[in-house]
Image (cartoon, helix red, strand yellow):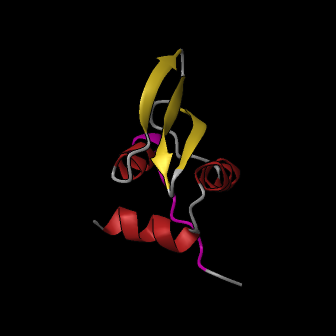
Amino acid sequence: MGERLPRLKPLQLIKALSKIGINVERQKGSHAQLCGFYKGEMKFTTIPIHAGKELPDGIVLATLRDCGLTKKELMQLLEK
């Protein structure tokens, strides 16, 4: 079936994405908009930031899809 996603807080995911050049462009309210070049393409995604709450799996998967990452690549970024 594949690897399970770890339970992530929003700032953990943002930190992992910043390692590959996808950074916070702006934040309005409780949502951060990120963009950057990865694998030769401009990537955009939005991550909700709610204090003390973990991101649902669906949000993490949507972010991975938006950024062109696999679960395995995310796990490697989190280990760095």
Q: Between 37 and 27, which is closer to the camera in this rendering?
A: 37
Q: Between 17 and 1, which is closer to the camera in this rendering?
A: 17
Farthest bottom residue in view: 1
Residue at (45%, 26%) from the top-left corner? 25
In magenta stretch: residue 49: no
Q: Which residues are magenta?
A: 3-11
In magenta stretch: residue 8: yes
Farthest front residue in view: 40
Classify residue 4 by image quadrant: bottom right
Residue 34, image x, y percentages: 50, 34
Residue 76, image x, y percentages: 39, 71
**As drawn, 77 above or below 45:** below
Magenta stretch prevailing secondary structure: loop
Residue 78, image x, y percentages: 37, 63
Q: Quadrant of the C terminus?
A: bottom left
Residue at (54%, 22%) from the top-left corner? 30
Farthest left residue in view: 80
Q: Between 53 and 70, which is closer to the camera in this rendering?
A: 70
Could you tell whether 70 is left or right of 25 in the image?
right
Q: Quadrant of the N terminus?
A: bottom right
Q: Between 80 and 35, which is closer to the camera in this rendering?
A: 35
Tell me if residue 26 can be seen. Answer: yes
Residue at (64%, 48%) from the top-left corner? 66
**As drawn, 7 above or below 30:** below
**As drawn, 17 above or below 28:** below
Tell me if residue 49 can be seen. Answer: no
Could you tell whether 41 is left or right of 25 in the image?
right
